[in-house]
Amino acid sequence: MKTENTVWHPTQISKSDRARLKKQRPCLLWYTGLSGSGKSTIANAVDDLLFERQCHTYLLDGDNVRHGLNGDLGFSDEDRVENIRRISQVGKLFVDSGLIVSTAFISPFQSDRDMARELLEQGEFIEVFIDTPIEICEQRDPKGLYKKARAGEIKDFTGIDSGYDIPVKPEIHVQTAEKDILACAQQIVDHLKTQGYIN
């Protein structure tokens, strides 16, 4: 929804100017997968590898964002949609600043991920499917959430009583059951290299 009586104010410095200064192609790495799949862990490992290469990055983690910007939202389907709408807009601003930005959110609905993609220019949105079987996610259960969801203590939990739309054609498909964290992270960095986002 657009606010009334506002006009977009053009800025002097363009996205391409900022990208040229940073010597990289800005993009949004959109990590999606079940709770416990390893999204945040892998996103952090990628961020570390990119930092070592002197890339300019920022990581927006789902839990961290809910401590501030999205602290007023719950986990109903409607709140999940709004959660993703807000982070999509923030991600777009970060890409405009010339950064390689990562978002680690379950983002269970394909329509929401498509909405985030449509905000950006061609090639700027990179869907990263962290594909981990739910059985493994439950075994890990680092926050004890699956146990609570199975006991009925948490409602609207993705994979238990709320659905997850498996990505149809993600740019990067990471199968964590077959690789360790570093190998998963390297797969993503290699994609950025071969596609010309980083040198």
Image: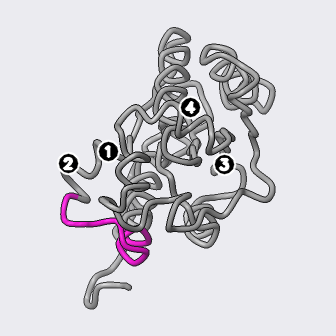
- Mark 4 and mark 1: Cα distance apart in space: 32 Å
Crowding near the residue tagged with mark 3, few <14, some 14–19, many ≥20 C-alpha atoms within 10 Å: many
Check contact, mark 2 vs mark 1: CB within 8 A.
yes
Q: Nearer the viewer, residue 106 or 5?
A: 106
Residue beneath disc 3: 127
Q: Residue at 64% x, 67% y: name it.
A: 110
Q: Position of residue 122 (x, y in %)?
A: 71, 56
Residue beneath disc 2: 67
Tell me the quadrant of the picture where the C terminus can be found. Answer: top right
Q: Amino acid at mark 2?
A: His
Q: Give the foreground label among 3 and 2.
A: 2
Q: Amino acid at mark 3?
A: Glu
Magenta residue span: 71-82
Residue beneath disc 4: 20
Judged from the image, the secondary structure of the residue bearing numbered disc 3 is strand
Q: Give the foreground label among 4 and 1.
A: 1
Q: Give the foreground label among 3 and 1.
A: 1
Q: Residue at 37% x, 73% y: name it.
A: 76
Residue beneath disc 1: 63
